[in-house]
Image: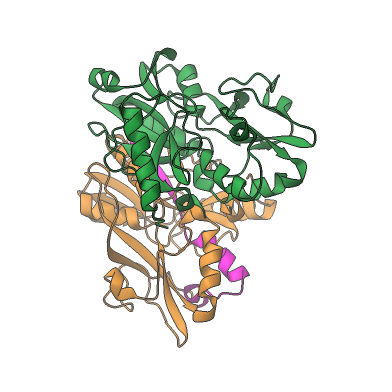
Chain colours: A green, B orange
């Protein structure tokens, strides 16, 4: 499909990217509603094939929606954008260690002009569909970041890259779980259907109230924890695989594209 | 999903691969029914990133379902397989020219031990769904290969790789076109919904009766030509981009996997 954004949507996306470029550091949940947001992982060219292969082998957590080749900084999904500046908060990684969080990554591209940047689909895309179907998204209601957890499930390795699956969790009323599965399943290019429903322990998650990324959840009576593959999974791969250098977004601070979520609905 | 093949299906897939390994050269339409078949493109390691990127940017014609890294010859989709021998007919390409068709490609891997092989989804997968819905597949009825055409639509380039989209065509009764769109749309990982319905001229196809690959079609009264993105598209990219060396399957002679078609239904 080629779904076109409305002029209002495009204006809000461009205004948001411009604000982040000027230094604003705010989570992007609810920003430019209806437009696709993306996770970022950028690696030196020597690691690019393995990164793309890791994504191909683990498409649920790592659905690549754009690749910005070495020497380029503009995403095809957002004309006029600059991947070095247009995200609210970046993370800089050296040898698998998080060494800096910053609102601008131009120094990273100066140090490594051969960086190849991968944009990976984000679960915010299917959250739009859930909300439209009357399924409440708790972390949105609470103004929090979605809770994310490292699991005991290994992704399929690719060359030097390995790491565990990271999932996001949303409490869903038991009577709406099937709907949530079907609605998110219609966007297979952006995480798709849940990977797991109901039992945190079998994913190796000891305590739902202590997520590895994002904010603590609030699980109410009659709700089931539903787990989706998460675009923070590449950051777990960086921690486990220790490439010499990498740049990512900070969880919750996504790259905003000009592409409507509807583009990814089958 | 993780859909498992039946013992009978696995036996037929293994028997077919063994027969091709022994030298049998027959098209694979109808072989090991219900199991996914795949297109092959193998390139030297130096071209692997661009090939995977070309596939990522052109997912409808080039849906990658497995990558066999340099030094390996077994597909994860078919334990015990050997990508050098288990296809009925291979094509060897040098500088963009088809120089040989042969039933065994071990000499190619001997000459280029760094070949990286990409398996790409095949429209046979959704044909199963069409037949089950009572939509006749003409080329199957006639015992012919599906007709395939080079179009005037350029794929999105990736590095040194460029080329036009290749489509396959099936005549569909006008009253079933919508069904055919919806059924094939349920397998977005293997070409998905048609790219075009009804007007060959707007794709730059001058004469439907003279396909660029495969056999001539038979279009009957009340039928509409429906065009799907085709896994032969990488061969058009080889012709246009002239990598020094490449190996592909011969159109219609696919790699048979152990994975049920249902695995790719959303």
Nearest the eye: B128 or B19: B128
In the image, residue A48 above or below residue A209: below
Query: From the image, which quarter does the N terminus of chain A lie in?
Result: bottom left
Residue B124 picture location, percent across and down = 50, 62
Magenta span includes B60: no
Residue B226 picture location, percent across and down = 43, 72
Nearest the eye: A199 or B232: A199
In the image, residue A191 above or below residue A27: below
Count of marks overlaid on the render: 0
Q: Is residue A77 left or right of residue B245?
A: right
- Please tell me in which quadrant of the rendered image residue A139 appears: top right
Residue B170 picture location, percent across and down = 45, 72
Q: Is residue B3 visible?
A: no
Q: Is residue A203 left or right of residue B256?
A: right
In the image, residue A264 above or below residue A75: below
Residue found farthest to the right: A221
Nearest the eye: B82 or A223: A223
Nearest the eye: B235 or A255: A255
**Which residue is located at x 61 percent, y 45 percent?**
A131
- Please tell me in which quadrant of the rendered image residue B182 appears: bottom right
Query: What is the span of residues highlighted in magenta in the rendered image?
Result: B115-142
Q: Is residue A54 visible?
A: yes
């Amino acid at each position: 499909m080629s779904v076109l954004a409305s002029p209002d949507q495009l204006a809000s996306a461009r205004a948001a990217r411009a604000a982040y470029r000027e230094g604003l550091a705010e989570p992007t949940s609810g920003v430019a509603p209806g437009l696709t947001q993306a996770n970022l992982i950028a690696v030196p060219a020597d690691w690019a094939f393995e990164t793309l292969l890791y994504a191909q082998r683990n498409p649920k957590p790592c659905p690549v929606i754009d690749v910005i080749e070495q020497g380029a900084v503009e995403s095809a999904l957002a004309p006029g954008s600059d991947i070095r500046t247009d995200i609210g908060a970046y993370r800089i990684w050296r040898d698998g260690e998080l060494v800096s969080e910053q609102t601008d990554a131009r120094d990273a591209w100066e140090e490594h002009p051969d960086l190849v940047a991968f944009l990976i689909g984000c679960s915010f895309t299917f959250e739009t569909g859930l909300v439209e179907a009357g399924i409440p998204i708790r972390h949105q209601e609470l103004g929090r970041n979605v809770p994310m957890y490292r699991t005991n499930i290994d992704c399929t390795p690719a060359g030097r890259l390995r790491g565990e699956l990271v999932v996001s969790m949303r409490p869903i009323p038991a009577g709406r779980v099937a709907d949530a599965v079907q609605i998110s399943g219609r966007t297979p290019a952006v995480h798709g259907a849940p990977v797991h429903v109901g039992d945190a322990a079998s994913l190796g998650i000891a305590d739902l109230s202590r997520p590895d990324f994002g904010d603590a959840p609030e699980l109410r009576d009659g709700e089931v924890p539903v787990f989706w593959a998460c675009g923070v999974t590449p950051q777990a791969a960086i921690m486990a695989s220790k490439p010499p250098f990498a740049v990512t977004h900070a969880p919750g601070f996504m790259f905003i594209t000009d592409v409507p979520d509807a583009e990814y609905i089958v």
